[in-house]
Image (cartoon, coloured by chain):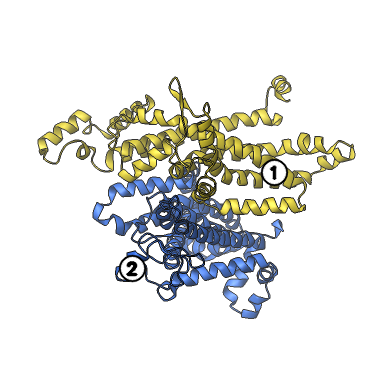
Amino acid sequence: MAVMVVVAFVAFLMFNFVGDPVDNMVGQEASYADREAMRDRLGLNDPFLVQFTRFAGNAVQGEFGISYRLQRPVADLISERMPATLELVMASAILAILIGIPLGVYTGIRRDALSSRLVLMFSLVGVSLPTFVIGILLIYVFAVILGVLPSFGRGEAVQLGWWSTGFLTVSGWKAIILPSITLALFQMTLILRLVRSEMLEVMRTDYIKFARARGLSDRTINFGHAFKNTLVPVITIIGLNVGSLIAFSIITETVFQWPGMGFLFIQAVGFADVPVMAAYLVLVALVFVGINLLVDILYFVVDPRLRVDRSVAMGGDE
Amino acid sequence: MLDEKTAAKAPSGFVHRFMDSDLVYSFLRSPVVVISFIITALYFLSAAFAPWIAPHNPFDPASLDLMEAFTPPAWTADGSMKFILGTDDQGRDILSTLIFGSRISLIVGFSAVLFSVVLGVGLGLLAGYAGGWAETIVMRFADVQLTIPAILVALMIDGIARIIVPVELRDEMSIYVLILAIGVSDWPRYARVTRGATLVERNKEYVSAARVIGVHPIKIMFQHVLPNVMGPVLVMGTIGLALAIITEATLSFLGVGVPPTQPSLGTLIRVGNNFLFSGEWWITLFPSLALVILVLAVNLLGDWLRDALNPRLR
């Protein structure tokens, strides 16, 4: 909540005090009296707190004004482009989790095998490769040399009500492959390394030794006992990283000219289009706060020790 | 453990004592680390002596010849030995632009890290040593900022600066804006670590002793506590350099970083990206490679430094 207020405040400051909004609306020739009239109409002469409350009120209703560059309401622009970004982020998150976690568990269990060493080497490269370089390399290999996948756009999108999806057409699926891999790679290596170090730690504990002594199968020990106990930190990191996926989608969207919010935002920064920047910032902050909340709730699902109500615990355990 | 080592190393100044230390031993034992050190050193040297090393001066319009634009690398059929890595769309030698580009990247990365270290360590020391409301404000601020990815913060600062700075000054100022943006985006990590270490140090006897004999708190903070918390900061700074270089390259790639007249590696990649489809792959791939190698080398150094300075992780 505190985060939200601070972010809204910064956005508001940007909106009102960075450059005079009146300058952006009236022409060069406007007289001083005209400006004053304009200020009055826009409520810019009201006390500071009144203005902020009004801004916050409008923001809650999704009103962020009109984009300087495109001359269209910011709310429309954003809602048009949100599905593209969310689909990209979702695809990358799923990819990162589905590949990162098993590899992490594997390298954690077989820590000295040649294959895990290779995976680790590869993961260090993954951390060092900036997102946009990955994107360029993928484009070069798959779009320029091999020519099998598209290098920009999101293919044909199908409108489902207000949501436009690329998942219903072949070209949409093809178009999302490269961007989602690009976006997922860094998160994947992070998840991999985290799961591995957690697994290494858990495997050393007494209860794993005891489980071994009881003659449980490797599978039960590795997944039922060891892996389950690594979940709390892993979920925290994954949750926080979904947020950074949204931030990094700015880069991926620029490389692949993906028609999402990030692309919109970076264009807004280039043109000093303040309403779009402010709206994007508030929206991203909202997503972050939402994710944090979700992560907190997930703790309770994953870790029975945190639950007060035992009967619910029994039901949700398996 | 960690403190003693850095403390022993810094003031002693004896070459043989330094050569004898665990740090040097573990350094020489790992070929990967030695190689990354050499690579990093080469980058730094070529950055420092760029005007003398670079075969051509890419920013001297008189030396450019558009007829030589798009020359491929020397080992391909159409390449010439004059331009080992080929030329770009304006006939600039890629190798030379790389050397100058790495220079800008390193300058921005280094200054940004320095900026966030000074800011983060200063505020962290204050928060840890003074406590009270100073601590609350600093740490709350750091927490809020940490929930937002650094790249987004840097973008935001860059965007705001773009609006404030007048158009004529934008190109000149952009490098400082970039340093400020990256520096500010990364300070909370240093503040957190410094505060944690300071909290531990604060209750040690040497601090109480200093306080009892009436040393000024500011002097205690900077002369006594600070040297003892610098170990982890050094490690973070190394990894932070890699991060800062990536952030700089990313911002430049997105077109909000340094102007094309003073290209960094990111700008070069951005420019070259336009020619990827027409087959001039070398214009973008060589800068990308240079960037990746630099970041990888710095990252490996940072990883090793962390392990070497922290016996618990061995």
Horizontal side of residue A195 vs B45, given as left or right: right
Q: Position of residue B15 (x, y in %)?
A: 62, 79
Is residue A93 visible in the rendered image? The answer is yes
Horizontal side of residue A124 vs B180, given as left or right: right
Q: Secondary structure at mark 2?
A: loop
User: Which one is in front, A104 or B303?
Assistant: A104
**Quadrant showing the C terminus of chain A:** top right
According to the image, label 2 marks what residue?
B64
The residue depicted at 66 percent of the width and 28 percent of the height is A301
Q: Is residue A36 above or below residue B105?
A: above
Q: Amino acid at mark 1?
A: Leu
Q: Position of residue A264 (x, y in %)?
A: 38, 38
Mark 2 Cα-neighbour bin, 10 Å: few <14, some 14–19, many ≥20: some
Horizontal side of residue B170 vs B116, given as left or right: left
The residue depicted at 82 percent of the width and 43 percent of the height is A206
Letter of the chain shown blue in the rendering: B
Q: Amino acid at mark 2?
A: Leu
Are the residues under marks 1 and 2 on the same chain?
A: no
According to the image, label 1 marks what residue?
A103
Observer-side mark, 1 or 2, equals: 2
Q: Colour of chain A?
A: yellow
Q: Is residue B23 above or below residue A185?
A: below
- Disc assigned to residue B249: none
Mark 1 Cα-neighbour bin, 10 Å: few <14, some 14–19, many ≥20: many
Q: Is residue A169 above or below residue B213?
A: above
**For the residues marked 1 and 2, what is the alpha-carbon distance in whole angstroms?**
50 Å
The residue depicted at 63 percent of the width and 43 percent of the height is A191
Q: What is the chain letter for disc 1? A: A
Q: How many marks?
A: 2
Q: What is the chain letter for disc 2? A: B
Q: Secondary structure at mark 1?
A: helix
